Structures are given as C-alpha cells and as structure tokens.
Image: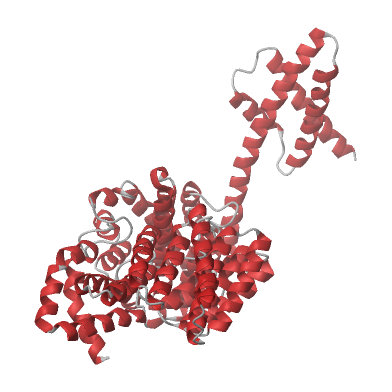
Amino acid sequence: MPDSLSLRDRYLELIDKIVQATLKGQIRSKEQVYQMLVEGVSPGTGEIFERYLGDRIAVTQRQTETQADEFKQAKAVRSLRALQTIRGEWERWQEQNQATEALSRAIQQIATAETGDRLHTFLKLTDPNRPQALTLSQLQRLAKTLQQQLTQPEATADTNGQQELQQLSQGLNQGLTSWQRLEDHLVSWIYEQGQGKLGFEGVPGQRGPWTLWAKQVNSPVPQSLFHALSLEQSVVEWAAQSTSLDLSALVELVVVLRCLQQGLVNWFDKLVYDSKVGAKLSISTFLAFAVIWSQIANGIRQGAIAPSQTSLVDGCSQLTLQILRTFAQRDYFPLYGGIFASFSGEYLRNALDYLDEPLRRAEGTQEKARILTLLGYSFRAQGRVEESVAFHQQALEVAREAGDRPCEVANLNHLSRTCLAQTNYAEAINYSQRAVILSRQAGDRLGEANALANLGYSEVFQAQQLEQAEPEIYESAIDRLQQGLQLSEKLGDRQSQALCLSSLGIVQVALDQAQGAIAYLEGGIQAAQFSGDLYLQGINLAYLGEAYHRLQNPAQAIHAGCLGMYLLDQIASNTWRQPAGLLTVIKGQLGDEAFQTSLQQQRPAIISVIGVDGYDYLPTLLERYKTE
C-alpha cells in the first residue's frame, strides 16, 4: 500500500509539474512534455499513470463548467488544455512503447523458438492480419538484433539454431535491400504498358511487372523468380529445380513479395478516378501473390525435399493463408465473382489446385467461408462441378456458423447455379427460393438480385424440361429475371448485372427468340468485361454466336463464337466446347473455303480483343474439338 501511495503521489506531482510549467510559459514544445513523460513514468506502470491523468482531467473539466469566478475559470481552461496536451503525448508514448515492446517480444520469441520452428514464428509475428505486425523499420532492427544474438555465449552451443538465426538475419537484410531497389518501380510498368490492359497481363518477356522487376533487382533468387513469371514458366518447376531456396532466400522473398503485394493493393485501392477498376486490380493482386506462394510450396514439395525444407513448405502455405485472410476482409471481396479477373498466363491456369491445399489447413472462420465461395465459383466455371458443390456446401456451413448472412446467401445462389449446370432444375429452384427468403430477411439486396435471377432462370428451364408451354409460366419466370436485373442496376453491381443479362439472353435463345436475346447478351458481355469475369464473358459470347446462327448471320456467329471459345479455354473451362461445336456446324454448312474467308474478314475485330496470338490459336482449338 505505501508503494502504491508513493507511486500515486509521484505521478500526480509529475502531472502538476507539467501543468504549472505550461501555465508559466516554460513549455516551448510538445516534445518537452513527451520527454518529461519518458523520464517520469516507470516501465510497467502506465495504466496507473493513465488512471490518475484521467481523474485529473475529469476534475478540471468540471471546474471549467462550474467555476463562477472568471479568473479561476480561465485558469481551469488553460490547465485543461495542458492536461489534454499531456494526454496526447502520453498516447504517443504508449504507441511507441508498444512498438518497442512488440519488437522485444518478437526477438525473444524467435531467439527462443525450437530449431526448425523459427520460420513459422517469424511469419506469425509479421502476419499483416495481426494488430501490431512488424514494420519495415522494425524488421531492420530485428535483423540487427538477431545478428547480435549470434555472439552470445549460449548461441554458440546450438549449431543448428545459430545457423537459422544467421539465415533469418541475412534474409531480412537482403530482402530489405532488394525492396529498396524495387520500391521506385512499383507501378511504373503500368505506364510503360501504354494502351495495354492493367493487371498482370503482357507479352511474355516484354511487358507486365515481372520483366521490369527482374531487371531492377540484383539478388539471384527474386530475380530468377521474376524472370520465370515474366516468361509464364511454371513456378512449381522453378521452385522444384531451385538449388538456392533455403531459409535465407525464402525470408528474402517474404519481404520482397509482401512489400510488392501490399504496395500494389494500396495503390490500386486509391484509384479514385475509377474505384471499381481499382478493386478489380486489387482482387487480381491478392490472388496472384497467394497463388505464387502456393506454387512455391508445391514446387519445394515436388523437389528433392530435405527434412529441413519441410518448414519451408509449411511457411509458404502459411503465407498463402495470410494473404487470403487479408483479402477476405476487404469490402470488395467477390462473393459473386471468379478468380479470373485481369489474369493471363499458364502459371495461373491451375491456381485453384494450388489454393486448395493450404486452405484445407485453415480453421472454420468467416474468412475461410468467403475463400471457399470464391473457389467454388471458379471450379464451376472450369466444369469441375462435384468439387464446386463440395466447396459451396462447406462454405455454406462455415458461413452459417460464423453468422455471415451475405456469404450464406451467396452460397445458396451458387449451389442453385451449379444445380442448373447439372440440369437439376427442381433443386436449383429450391436453393434459389431459400436464397430469396434469407436475403430479404437479412436486407441483402445484392443476394436478392442474384437469387431472383437464378429463380427465374431455373423456372424457365424446368418448364421446358417438363414441356409446360403455358405462356404464364414463362412470363412469371422472365418477370423474376427482370426484377433481378432492375435491382442489380439500382445497386450498380456490374457482376450481378452480367449474370441477369446473361440469364435473360440465354432464356431468350432457349425460347427461340434469338433477336430479343442479342441485346441482353451484348449488355451481359459489356457488364462482364467491366467486372473482369472472363467466364461470364465467354458464356455470353457463346450464346450470342448461337443467336446469330439462328438468325442466319454466319459472320457475326463466327466472330462471337471464336471469342467465346478462346476466352473459355483460357480459363480452362470445358464449356469452350459449346462454341467450338457451333463453329464446326457453321463450317460444315458454309464449306471450308467460305468459312476461312469469313473468319479472315472477322480477323481485325477478333484481334482487337484477343490479339494475334489468340487469333492464330483458333484453328488449334477447332482441331482439338474434333479429336478429343
């Protein structure tokens, strides 16, 4: 008790001393107040000081409100200002002290971690999802302190532990050096692409970020990785064949790739001239870097893995989950979109497989439900329906447990759409009806728009399956589709607009109303282009080709069919065979020579979308369709 009283008296005296010095004009800057707090407050007693400061502020605040004497009231007002200055500098002291304490704890945890567990500990402490993840300046201090740890007598007794600390320190220093060389070139590649698309697209070895970054960095491991990415080579093979991918190199990559990813996301998020384009590019960035870490893990696993490299595989999976968890917390996370926005290149075609492995290790969190939703949609786009259903069912369960209603509604909608792909129209109607009810209860207007579109779409195809030709059935179903479209337009959600327009267009084709379908499908293509969903673009183009074919317009049918076939193949969707079949029929009707002439006439329009390489690849796809 005496000690407590002594501490109380000391802190009240310190507060009074600063207030009196302020009233006498002896305090010239806030820095003086800060230094007095640093010298006067003992470590570990901050809560006690804060309590006494709060009491003094409350008493002085009452004096300013109740004091009748003008002179005493003026003094109370000045004292209150001084006390508020103390509080401001105290909060600054706390923030800096917490950062120092966080660094001290990090150093202690890494230094005392079991041999083989230091990478896991380091990645946990630097996880961006933590409230106090280490900053770059703290990483510099961490590297220096770890190096100093090696000179301690107890460190020399543990050879393996000493080697890990050495490699961690080296990796941090090299990563920070590499990032300094890259920092000024974070987004310069975007301007150099001129009229090219934003994102990670570009001519292999010539355009896109990887080529530029490979030229700027002079450290062998990140330089080699960027070179492989720039040429669209397999990251899995790169990691499997790399002989220098040890703990030091991996830590360097952690610093470099994390800084690049976070820097790009921050920059894209600030694209105020078009926030939706910025969100699309941020989505691409999160997914691209998550996939890269997953592929590195897979490559190390496939290589001649030594026992010491097991922690590297686990670390890469840990990094993938950290990125996905950060992504899942963003308000632009695409509950109704796919993985394909702004992506190109072979190294991303199998992204889903690589993301699947680390996701299996994640716990049942809201973030996991959202990531599973994204993967489920993307699997369905690739025609892997059973896997898609499994993802959405698991996501539905996790979202329900986490109380994430929008995610729950989204998965009901996705399951409805998946049942449609399986021609199970009754079950599709069941899921979409549940989604309508739940979305309205939760006030989820976006979910409701999608649910209405799915419900109307399902009802049309069920009526056709049952050969129910009554106009009232179709009118009611199309009315639901129109309601969904109007709601998505009101919300300004282009992804949902693309789905609704696509659904209306496909229904019109199914009802043999090809002319009416064209406007919907063309609108669906534009909306899907804006949202960056290549799957919906491809599906709309495929049905647009079918509509023009029914209208006996082979030139436009060839144009739309070729684009749809190519885009769907690029995302590994087996639906590319639908427009390929249509083109094969048209070729048989026109004859080979007339078909080639018409295709050549469409060449400029096709090249403007998929480029010369894409156009030249079209005959290969048509040949594949005949032989597979």
* In the displayed structure image, the side of residue 204 where residue 108 appears, left or right: right
Which part of the image, by quadrant, shows the N terminus? top right
Residue at point 59%, 51% (across, down): 132
* In the displayed structure image, the side of residue 550 where residue 341 appears, left or right: right
Above or below: residue 32 compared with residue 333 = above
Residue 561, position as x, y percentages in the image:
26, 74
Above or below: residue 601 compared with residue 579 = above
Residue 22, position as x, y percentages in the image:
68, 17
Q: Viewer-proximal residue, 549 or 283?
A: 549
Residue at point 66%, 13% (across, down): 25
Q: Viewer-proximal residue, 255 or 172?
A: 255
Which part of the image, by quadrant, shows the C terminus? bottom left
Residue 536, position as x, y percentages in the image:
39, 69
Q: Viewer-proximal residue, 87 or 187?
A: 187
Above or below: residue 187 compared with residue 574 = above
Residue at point 61%, 55% (across, down): 105
Q: Quadrant of residue 566?
A: bottom left
* In the displayed structure image, the side of residue 273 where residue 74 appears, left or right: right
